[in-house]
């Protein structure tokens, strides 16, 4: 198993339990320090979300800038953006940025691309927002341009439906050969799944239970079959949330403390979790939470097994107790060695 650490670059406190429910205000420098800590603890990669406005107060660090700083503060750990949104950056510029980061980091980039799904932030910044079908088509064509630029030894003339270049060069080229791994995520539509089968080296799911994940994997398998490709060629990843503590009582205490924060506007509160805590249910929190990793190290070990049995080998982890570092340290000390 491979474990990545998701850097807390936005705050989203409260009972939504969404990514950073214990964090009440963004601290950019502290967020970067957690990435440095993740490398020291033995995590395999660090990941930053890619948004312009996010969290309860719309404050979020820009992804590429943040990743570049982290690259300079670390030496070994791999680097990735989560769902890098095509509408934010023209594909040729994205290719240039990615190649530079791969070169200066010594070949540590994972290129996790997306067509963009949050309309308000895109319109707020005055960027184009086509319909879903066109955004998928733009992402698909954009990936063709990006990979062509990475591999071009001569000036590249690219003429597509949406994007073009005239005698463009992308130097320095990426260090990794034949190129940085390309990841795509989710299992939304047939067109989206077909783009994954054409371009991706890795596939990632947002937090879901094993039963929901199984349905996504079935859809992905169908796309691979349509493309004449073996699904075994894809690295399968789960982005998920972690609430870990030495005892089940400590896990519940952490969750109760998060509920006390004012609710975020970003995501609806998890009523099932709140009600479970309010009635002092004696069962472990995992009895009601099926789409996170939650509990003691032993309990989480068993939950991980449920996902690996479906073929998941990569886990991207959001530690819900941040700004405490206890969770990421306990996970590293008890589960990474296994």
Image (spheres, rainbow, N blue to C red):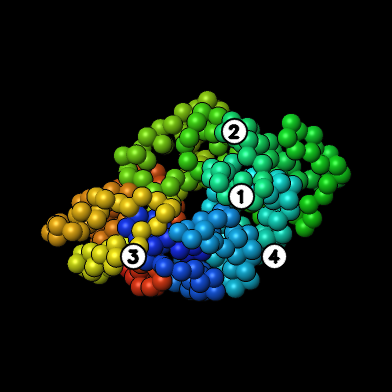
Of circles 3 and 4, which is in front? 3
- The N terminus, quarter of image: bottom left
Quadrant housing residue 105: bottom right
Query: Residue, x 54% and y 74% (percent of image)?
Result: 29
Of circles 2 and 4, which is in front? 2
SS state under label 1: helix
SS state under label 3: loop
Q: Foreground: 14 or 207?
A: 14
Query: Residue at label 4?
Result: 104
Give the mark nearest the N terminus, 1 or 3.
1
SS state under label 2: loop
Circles 3 and 2: CB distance less than 8 Å?
A: no
Circles 3 and 4: CB distance less than 8 Å?
A: no
Q: Foreground: 22 or 33?
A: 22
Q: Which numbered disc covers residue 124?
A: 1
How crowded pointer 2 is (Cα within 10 Å; few <14, some 14-19, many 20+) is rated as few
Query: Residue at label 3?
Result: 261
Query: Residue at label 2?
Result: 131
């Amino acid at each position: 198993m491979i474990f990545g650490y998701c850097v807390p670059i936005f705050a989203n406190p409260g009972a939504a339990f969404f990514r950073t429910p214990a964090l009440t205000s963004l601290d950019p420098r502290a967020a970067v320090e957690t990435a440095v800590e993740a490398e020291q603890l033995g995590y395999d990669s660090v990941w930053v979300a890619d948004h312009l406005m996010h969290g309860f107060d719309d404050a979020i660090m820009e992804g590429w800038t943040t990743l570049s700083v982290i690259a300079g503060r670390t030496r070994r750990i791999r680097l990735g953006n989560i769902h890098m949104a095509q509408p934010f950056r023209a594909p040729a510029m994205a290719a240039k940025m990615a190649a530079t980061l791969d070169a200066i980091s010594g070949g540590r980039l994972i290129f996790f691309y997306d067509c963009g799904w949050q309309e308000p932030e895109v319109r707020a910044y005055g960027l184009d927002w086509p319909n879903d079908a066109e955004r998928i088509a733009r992402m698909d064509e954009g990936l063709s341009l990006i990979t062509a630029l990475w591999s071009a030894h001569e000036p590249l003339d690219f003429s597509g439906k949406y994007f073009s270049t005239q005698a463009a060069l992308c130097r320095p080229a990426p260090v990794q050969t034949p190129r940085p791994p390309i990841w795509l995520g989710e299992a939304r539509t047939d067109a989206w799944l077909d783009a994954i089968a054409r371009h991706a080296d890795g596939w990632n799911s947002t937090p879901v239970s094993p039963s929901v994940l199984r349905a996504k994997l079935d859809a992905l398998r169908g796309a691979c079959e349509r493309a004449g490709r073996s699904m075994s060629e894809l690295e399968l990843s789960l982005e998920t949330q972690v609430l870990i503590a030495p005892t089940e009582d400590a896990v519940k205490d952490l969750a109760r403390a998060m509920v006390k924060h004012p609710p975020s506007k970003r995501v609806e509160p998890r009523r099932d979790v709140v009600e479970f805590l309010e009635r002092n249910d004696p069962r472990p929190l995992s009895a009601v939470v099926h789409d996170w990793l939650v509990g003691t190290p032993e309990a989480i070990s068993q939950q991980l097994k449920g996902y690996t049995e479906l073929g998941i080998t990569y886990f991207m982890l959001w530690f819900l107790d941040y700004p405490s570092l206890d969770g990421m340290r306990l996970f590293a000390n008890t589960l990474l060695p296994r």
